[in-house]
Image: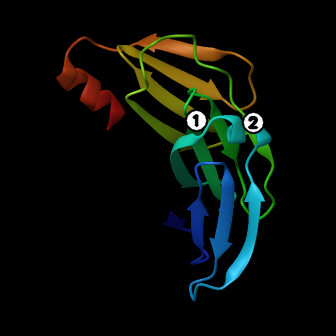
């Protein structure tokens, strides 16, 4: 759950249904992020403001796929490129919304950049010191 810039309450359910209420609790509208999410479930969601000042949503599923909605008023879902297969769970992730919306995901000592307009990912190795790693993510 989180609030938009328009003071609307956004509730994201684990099956991918997003329900929006106004500040008084009155139902506004709902939408489904993706049918693919119903087969798994959302384990974490993040809201962000894109450069056009619209509220967006990024969700991470139980099979570590990332889906993006750049504007909850006109929802169009994009699935970001898949992470390489691994038994290691992501430890941290953040949405970067500048010219385009990208997602950074940390898994073990690797940092991945998922770009919404590309079909591949960028991988970088993190420094081995946990202090240096924290500086990169802050």
Percent position of residue 2, x then y: 50, 65
| Residue 40, position as x, y percentages in the image | 63, 35
Q: Residue at x 56, y 27 (%)?
A: 64
- Left or right of residue 73, residue 51 in this image: left
**Relative to 20, is 76 on the left or the right?**
right
Answer yes or no: do the residues labelled 1 and 2 have beta carbons within 8 Å? no
Total label count? 2
Foreground residue, 37 or 55?
37
Q: Position of residue 129 (x, y in %)?
A: 20, 15
- Residue at image x 58%, y 35%? 61
Residue 12 versus residue 87 in the image, above or below: below
- The C terminus sits in image quarter: top left
Find residue 19 and name its label: none
The quadrant where residue 91 appears? top left
Residue 119 vs residue 64, the one in the foreground:
64
Is residue 18 toward the left or the right of residue 133 in the image? right
| Residue found farthest to the front | 39
Name the quadrant containing residue 126: top left
Tag 2 residue: 36
56 relative to 132, above or below: below
Residue drawn at x 60%, y 40% as measured from the top left: 41
Label 2: which secondary element: helix
Which residue bears the numbered disc 1? 61
């Amino acid at each position: 759950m989180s609030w938009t810039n328009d003071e609307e309450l956004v509730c994201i359910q684990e099956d991918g249904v997003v329900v929006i209420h106004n500040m008084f609790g009155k139902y506004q509208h709902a939408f489904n992020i993706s049918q693919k999410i119903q087969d798994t479930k959302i384990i974490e969601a993040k809201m962000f403001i894109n450069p056009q000042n619209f509220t967006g949503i990024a969700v991470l599923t139980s099979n570590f796929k990332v889906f993006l909605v750049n504007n909850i008023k006109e929802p169009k879902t994009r699935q970001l490129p898949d992470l390489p297969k691994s038994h290691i769970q992501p430890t941290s992730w953040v949405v970067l919304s500048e010219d385009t919306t990208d997602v950074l995901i940390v898994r073990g000592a690797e940092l991945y950049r998922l770009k919404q307009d590309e079909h591949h990912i960028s991988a970088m190795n993190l420094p081995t010191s946990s202090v240096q790693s924290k500086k990169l993510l802050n």
